Amino acid sequence: MTSSTPDLPAGRVSRLPVFALGLAILAIGIVLRILPIGREGFWYDEMFAASYTNLSVIQTFIAVLRFEIHPPLFYMQLTAWSGLGHSDTWLMLNSVTWSSVTLISIAVFAGRRFGRQAGLAAMAVCAFLGSEIYFAGELRQYAMLCAVATLTWAAAEHFLANRSFKGALPLGIALFPMAAMHSAASLIMLSGLVLYLFPYASLLNKTRQRTELWRWLRISVLAGVAMLPWLINANFRSISHTHNASLADGAHTVGGWILGYGDAFMSPTPYAVVAIALGAALLVSAWAVREVRRLAVCMVFWPLFFGMVLSIAIRPIWLDRVFAFCAPFAAIVLGAALVQLFEKCRQPAARTLLSVILAACAIGCAWAAWQQAIEPRKTQYRELAADIIAHKADGEFVYVPDNIIYWGVARYLVGPEWGSMLEVQDPERADSSEAWRKIYARLGTQKLNWLGLLPRTRQVDSPAGPLIIGWSPVPAMQTAKRFWLVGNNGLNPADLISCPQHLVSTRKYTGLQLHHVTCMR
């Protein structure tokens, strides 16, 4: 019997269900990442990225070198992204987009390397990872870091499969954006990549040994060249909240890949339990599945070990987010192992039980993600600004001495496009850094103006009166009867108030204090 309907190619028939399943997993992952958007405003660290978007791409590069320890790539692309809008929601969608790129990259490239089913399984694991959901809910570089790390690994796989100039070209290009992502994480990730690319098999083949080692050495040198400018930049700066590694820190980092790093789980016990279970699962996967062993060692275990060595022997760098890029690779390892486990489970009852266990794990991860989304954790700039507007009075002004806190207050008091962080600075003391005060003095007016660092004003207009920045004395304070003073929890209002007799009414917010000062004149 013949049919008038043409047959579809067999490959296409087999791909359609896989493609549909992949879309369903991607949709679930995106929904989980969108959940936190809009529930809170930005917090202290996010305010850097949000404020850079008011500059041009070139100005962003200069501003990042001025204010940041990290390379400028993420902030420059975010500035370009903001060309279509400056709202909190639109900017946050940048992180969601990059996190979605990670999911797609895992499905495509892990699928090519370990099989289509393994790619889908890895994508599903990554979709529910707490750290991936957590960083997709932050206006910071870590969602993009994970995406770029995954793509760089894909370029490395392409090089291993095609050891020629054309095969090496994507990897050579990928090394530079990877190096320009993060001062510590990029160094650690690229060290794992160099270890991953080492031609172990050629050591047994004297004919190919020299060629393969020379090719690997050139890639390694190129990775070092790509990292060098950002290592030099980071060497002149420091972060006060980094610390040495400990078992508790390691457990929190690894456990956070599943639970995330929000405040929903304050006790260290859940992180320790999850870290032990996840660590055991990764070790068993690496032992049982030969194909993922190198990936597990170089991209999951080595970064943790190398980070610990750096923190103890050279400089404290340990932070959970430094190892954010490891989570997608852990998902690939687990995904490939799960597929093999399913293939070995021949009995329907065993497969059903395994499916129930995996579904329970997915539901647990989704619940943890939801807890992160609903748990308030960010600096309450938005709430503080709303309070000022609700209680404003004629003749008042708002004084915010710290520049980063000022950017946050300005964003929610004036609006997202409140002004340029480079032009609105205290001309006498740009910030509390004495080192930068000396640098400004050395550069002089002409060079500061050429670089766009020359302050134009120390205030902008707001619905609550002038919004003033800087640590130098404020002339308006000499005659004002009432004004607002904003600082963090360590700010003592008495150190800045010039009128001898005054009353101070204080309201506390997460990470901030709002002081309403009345001078008794």
Image (cartoon, rainbow, N blue to C red):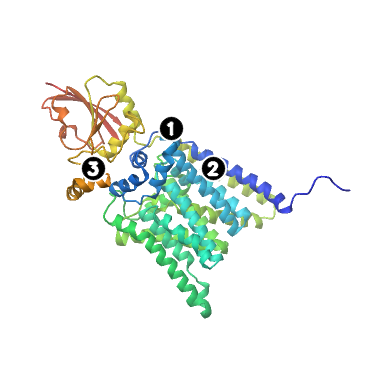
Alpha carbons under labels 3 and 2: distance apart: 44 Å
For image coordinates 34% across by 45% down, the residue present is 60
Residue 361: mark in rendering: none
Mark before the other along the chain sequence, 1 or 2 = 2
Amino acid of disc 3: Leu
Question: For residue 52, which quarter of the picture?
Answer: top left
Alpha carbons under labels 1 and 3: distance apart: 36 Å
Alpha carbons under labels 1 and 2: distance apart: 18 Å
Query: Mark 1 or 3, which is nearer the eye?
Result: 3
Residue 296 in view here: no
Residue 508 in view here: yes
Contact check, label 1 and label 2, Cβ < 8 Å: no
Question: For residue 82, which quarter of the picture?
Answer: top left
Identify whether 61 is placed above or below 424.
below
Residue 237 coordinates in the image, percent (x, y): 27, 53
Mark before the other along the chain sequence, 1 or 3 = 1
Quadrant of the rendering where the C terminus is positioned: top left
Q: Which residue is mark 3?
A: 454
Instruction: Name the residue nearer the viewer: 289 or 515.
Output: 515
Question: In the structure shown, which secondary structural element does the residue marked by tag 2 occupy?
Answer: helix
Q: Which residue is mark 1?
A: 39
For image coordinates 43% across by 70% down, the residue present is 217
Amino acid of disc 2: Gly
